[in-house]
Image (spheres, rainbow, N blue to C red):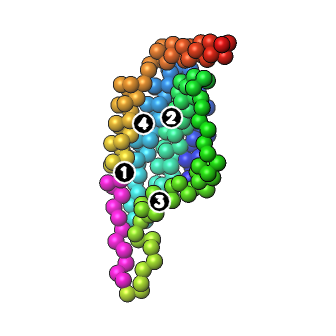
Amino acid sequence: MIPAALAMLVAAPISALLIVARGSQVTLLAGYTFCALELLAALVLWKEGSHPWQVAVSFILLGTGVGPAGTPSSHSLTGSVPVSRVAWHPKPQTCKEISTGRSYSPFWARSWPRGTQPRSPSAPPPRPRPTYLAHTVGIIIVILGALLVLVCFPRKDREIALLAEYASADAAAANS
């Protein structure tokens, strides 16, 4: 995970420059490209007995993809909601469940690999599960997400116009 975090730290500031120069759509697509490359690298390189560098390559690609994709995602979410419509007030119990991970426990309990559960000494060893299907599905999902961004996400000029509309709506709401 350290290679991914370092790559994300390097890529995130570059994404801000890319947003200014090319817009959020191009920046998101660049991030998605690296995320797809990460899944492809994991599909090809991760085998039984893989070297640490092979795993590190995948994590570096992941961080390089998340860094650029995270900035426009956050910017789009925060910039597209008018101030007058920001009204999410969670219950204290919901915050506690989220912060302690209790809301995710049922999901992880169902998805935890069976091979990690205790077994009796007489039971046969668990068979390793192939991960190629998970990586292939991940690549397909990233490609579908990139197509969605390409078709539905505004290009730079439209994005600037939308953000200006949102800013004027916020100013009008603040003055009234």
**Is 149 situated left or right of 90 in this image?**
left
Q: Which residue is mark 4?
A: 33
Answer above or below: position of 166 versus 45.
Answer: above
Label 2 – label 4 distance at C-alpha: 10 Å
Q: Which residue is mark 1?
A: 135
Residue 78 part of the magenta-drawn span:
no
Q: Which residue is mark 3?
A: 106
Quadrant including the C terminus = top right
Q: Which residue is mark 2?
A: 69
Residue flagged by tag 1: what amino acid is it?
His
Q: Position of residue 104 (x, y in %)?
A: 51, 55
Query: Judging from the image, what secondary structure is the residue with disc 2 in?
Result: helix
Query: Judging from the image, what secondary structure is the residue with disc 4 in?
Result: helix
Q: Nearer the viewer, mark 3 or mark 4?
A: 3
Reading the chain from its start, which is encountered first: label 2 or label 4?
Answer: 4
Residue 130 part of the magenta-drawn span:
yes
Dot 1 crowding, Cα within 10 Å, few <14, some 14–19, many 20+: some
**Is 161 situated left or right of 2 in this image?**
left
Identify the image quadrant of residue 154. Answer: top left
Q: Nearer the viewer, residue 173 or 64?
A: 173
For the magenta stretch, what is the residue range?
A: 123-134
Reading the chain from its start, which is encountered first: label 2 or label 3?
Answer: 2
Identify the image quadrant of residue 150. Answer: top left
Residue flagged by tag 2: what amino acid is it?
Ala
Answer above or below: position of 4 versus 152.
Answer: below
Label 1 – label 2 distance at C-alpha: 19 Å
Q: Nearer the viewer, mark 2 or mark 3?
A: 3
Query: Judging from the image, what secondary structure is the residue with disc 1 in?
Result: helix
Q: Nearer the viewer, mark 2 or mark 4?
A: 2
